[in-house]
Image (spheres, rainbow, N blue to C red):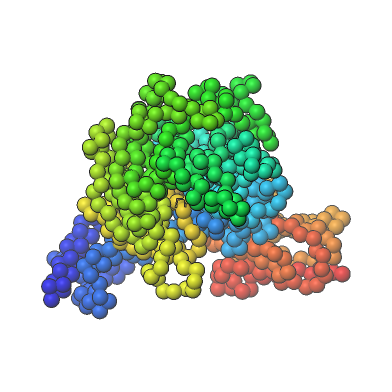
Amino acid sequence: MRRLIAIMFLVAALAMLLTACNDDEPEPTATATTAPVSVEGGGLPADALEVANARGLTPQDIRAALKTYVPSGKMDEYYLFTSGGQSGSVIVIGVPSMRILKNIAVFTPESWQGYGYGEVGSEAVLDGGNVDGTKIRMGDTHHPALSETNGDYDGQWLFINDKASARVAVVDLRDFETKQIVKDPNLISNHGSAFVPPNTEYVIQSSQYGTPLGWEYAPISEYKEKYRGLITMYKFDREKGRIDLENSFSIEIPPYWQDLCDAGKLVSDGWAFCNSFNTELATGGVESGNPPFEAGVSQRDMDYMHIFNWKKAAEVAEQAGKTEVMNGMRVIRIPTAVEEGILFLAPEPKSPHGVDVTPDGKYLTVAGKLDPHVTIYSFDKIMKAIEGGNWTKDEFGIPVLDFDEVMLTQVELGLGPLHTQYDGQGNAYTSLFLDSAIAKWSLGGEDPAGYKLLEKLPVQYNVGHIAAAEGDTVSPDGQYLVALNKWSVDRFLSVGPLKPQNEQLLDIGSDTMSVIYDMPMGIGEPHYAQMIKADKIKAWEVYPETGWDPIAQAPSEFATLAGEERIERDGNNVTIFMTSIRSHLTPEHVTLNQGDNVTWHITNIETAPDATHGFDLGGQNLSLSIEPGETATFQFVAEHDGTYAYYCTEFCSALHLEMMGYMFVEP
Ligand code: K7E
Ligand code: CUA
């Protein structure tokens, strides 16, 4: 009975709260039953309690449900962009509902979007990431980075790395499609990517596993001499919306197995920071009686944070004789980086994973996964230590700053600290992988005593990254935090041995944290995510003009309007200009000769939002998704004679099944 009263009280209180914050919502347009609930008006359904009891919901469950339920027709407050790991994609989720809005194919073909299934534009994007001519159609996406202006997400671009083959991709947030993939010509794997400085001048990437530059062959016995890491600063051209490889450059670094990076902001803008976890230079070989990597790389109590001045490096890269060009990329070698004061190291305990700059840019949190503490560094102290010159050198000649000179304090949080986010109210949140918990702790500014563990909340289970609302900006929102849990174990209906990940939504807007939603992520392994206010994204409803090339984001030279449909033949080169509109494809008959080279353009001449038409042609490895206004192109050689049906793959209208045609290939 007491529980019943508690539930009743809570439902009533929340109903009041709901009406209070819904003042600015538009008036409901449907029937009277859609009016907002109010306690006075008795708008609460009479059976609400009955439902809660029948489903065994606790007051906390009800609160969580009310916090996350987004009614039909209402919108989420935030977009969450999570990487899809080895699915090679980025997954877009609405917060707080945790509804999946879209899977953006990036490094891997995806037939629903018509990405990489014969459409010339997207094939070219994927081919941009080929490695030595090998088509790579797998990607391991880890860290999405939203473009920033003055340290704030601006909602224009999204960058994402591929750890497996050291590539970075650019997604345009006007249409949520991948526009470019670039390959680092000197690296074969990356990890500290993608990160951007406050004005997105560059996209930052650091290596993970040391390899000889250009991944040339060198025996592992020459690890120290020949193997290296790299920081690559990919120049981003906002005007073009593309990474400009010509104006990009790299900085050579030791083969320390760099991990995560973060860019400075405000006071620390111009600098960036990357962790490392194999300063032992372990080379493995467990099969020959050597210590295995996991032991070899974990011997030292301290590893090195790489501290680099990318602004100065960009100037140095422009000067004659300061770089070496390797496979077309300018590289600042270690001696030059040291001489120019670009590169420093600072000790950090012990095999760290994340480094995260505070919103004010003044402090850095390093989480050592084999150390129960987080270590807080002061940027001011780092600058003073650099000026002071009281440093030793590592075996590659790079200055190593004195730990006590740069470290501000350490906070003991628990086991396996990995990644940290901030809420803009002076709190930090760190994921504890081994504890399966989130630790909330306070930032103390210059006062070491102000850094304190406040609260720990269990999550399910093995949490990796966490993402707070606007978490990497100079002014985070707090309010929500998503825990990207690697294991879901017992949280969902079983779907066999491969289980989904668990993205748990936490309410961090109240005094104590609570889990308010469990979202199974069954289409990829999210590593990192970023959460942006929904109103910052200005996505197009339809393409701006009929006959649009979405890769160039400009009118297509192959645009075909109604009445302009035709088939042109020049010898055995045949070009088809087709239109699609509910509910017909024009032309409906295409007659070819066996052996013809065929170029086929289709323009979706619809102007209504959501009026997408797909296209498939039996016998070809083809799938197009042609959005309203888009012109898509595919090419093939008509090798086999026969009669083929082509059709619209998207159920677009009542007469969608009639939206087809025949292709005749005459022998
Ligand atoms: Cu999975 Cu940032 Cu690649 Cu940590 S990373 S968990
Ligand atoms: Cu167009 Cu179905």
Q: Name the residue: 48% across, 43% down.
A: 277
Q: How many labels does the image show?
A: 0
Quadrant of the snapshot with the C terminus = bottom right
Residue 169: image location, x then y, percent: 57, 47
Front-most of residues 301 and 551: 301
Report the side of 311 relative to 437 (left or right).
Answer: right
Q: Name the residue: 47% across, 73% down.
A: 495
Q: Is residue 67 above or below residue 329?
A: below
Is residue 356 visible to us here?
Answer: no
Q: Is residue 560 above or below residue 642?
A: above
| Residue positioned most to the front | 289
Residue 553: image location, x then y, percent: 59, 46
Quadrant of the snapshot with the N terminus = bottom left
Front-most of residues 74 and 200: 200
Front-most of residues 238 and 450: 450
Q: Splitting the image into 4 quarters, where does residue 23 fall?
A: bottom left
Is residue 644 visible to us here?
Answer: yes
Q: Is residue 602 above or below residue 231?
A: below
Q: Splitting the image into 4 quarters, where does residue 366 fall?
A: top left
Residue 219: image location, x then y, percent: 67, 43
Q: Name the residue: 60% across, 55% down.
A: 287
Residue 131: image location, x then y, percent: 68, 48
Front-most of residues 173 and 163: 163
Q: Splitting the image into 4 quarters, where does residue 240 fall?
A: top right
Q: Name the residue: 34% across, 38% down.
A: 376
